[in-house]
Amino acid sequence: MQKNTSSQNKPCAIFDLDGTVLTGPSSEGRFFLYLLWHGVITLKHIAYYLLNFLLTWRLRQNKSFYRGLKVKRLKRLAKVFAEKHLRVSLAPSAIKRMREEEERGRKVILLSGCPEFLLKYIASYTGCEEAIGLQLEQKNGVFTGRYIPPYPFGRGKMLLLESMPCKRSKSSGYGNHISDKYFLSLLSEPYCVNPGHSFRKYCNKKGIPILYWRSNKG
């Protein structure tokens, strides 16, 4: 995670990535298929994933398919993948809102469960100041298949936000999933983006504004 040297009093604008700023399937899901198609992820890595699932019964937090993959290689592939396949899925309305938040004096931050090595390349196309994603454990230049807590999803995002040097009483947040209610509850100006049924119902009940953002792809 990048070190933040900004003032404790600076307000922030916190943006979720998948389904909020980035439209379509999840960034990591698409990257997994890209790695599979190019033979980077093999049957061996899928076996690691299945074994971990049988031991833990976790899907979202199961990162065993990264086990044994070289960090430098994945970073190179992530840069190419983000440029060719994810950049076009960024919602122009989200980028516009980021610039508006900057004009209001807020520090724009991407907060996502997407692995940080991929997230930083996506963030470079949005112009946001900081990207905080899932930190995968690595040893001797190789991913171990484990991650460093907290996992940036649900209450995990809330824990990360609580540790950020942001003035939450004057900060905004944007999320698309019912699990985003936790981090949004800490901010004075929450927004509900492209919600599903349960999150739309929650936002209507709480009086949270609902926004709809789409990419240029439709």
Image: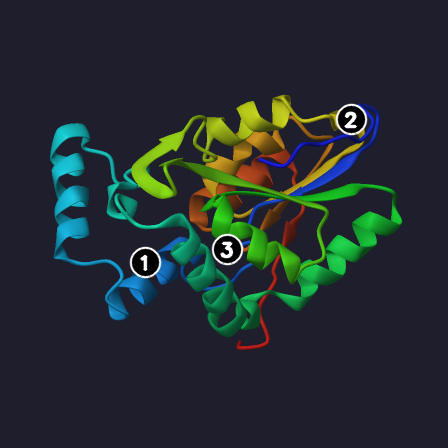
In the shown orientation, is residue 81 left or right of residue 14? left
- Residue at 57 percent of width and 51 percent of height: 120
Tag in front: 3 or 2: 2
Q: Cα distance, mark 1 to mark 3?
A: 17 Å
Question: Which mark is in front, 1 or 2?
Answer: 1
CB within 8 Å, label 3 to label 2: no
Local crowd at mark 3 within 10 Å, few (<14), some, or many (≥20)?
many
Q: Does residue 13 appear left or right of residue 83 in this picture?
A: right
Three-letter code for the amino acid on which mark 1 is drawn: Phe
Asked if 170 appears above or below 106 in the picture, the reply is above
Looking at the rendered image, the disc whose residue lies closer to the viewer, 1 or 3, is 1
Count numbered badges in the picture.
3
Could you tell me the amino acid type at mark 2?
Answer: Lys
- Residue 167's disc is 2
Q: Residue at x 61, y 65 (%)?
A: 91
Mark 1 lies on a secondary structure that is: helix
User: Label 1 belongs to which residue?
Assistant: 32
For the point 35% across and 56% down, the residue is: 29
On screen, residue 169 versus residue 23, left or right, reads right
Give the quadrant of the N terminus: top right
Vertical side of 111 occupied by 74: above or below: below
Using the numbered discs, state the Cα–Cα distance from disc 3 to disc 2 in whole angstroms. Answer: 25 Å
Task: Indicate which disc, 1 or 2, sits on the residue closer to the N terminus.
Answer: 1
Residue 67 position within the rendered picture, expressed as x and y whole percent measured from the top left: 26, 43
Q: CA distance from mark 1 to mark 2?
A: 36 Å
Name the residue at 87% across, 42% down. 105
Which amino acid, mark 3? Gly
Q: Which residue is mark 3?
A: 19
**What percent of the width, then of the height, locates residue 3?**
67, 32
Q: Are marks 1 and 2 in contact (CB under 8 Å)?
A: no
**Label 3 secondary element:** loop
Instruction: Give the quadrant of residue 159.
Output: top right
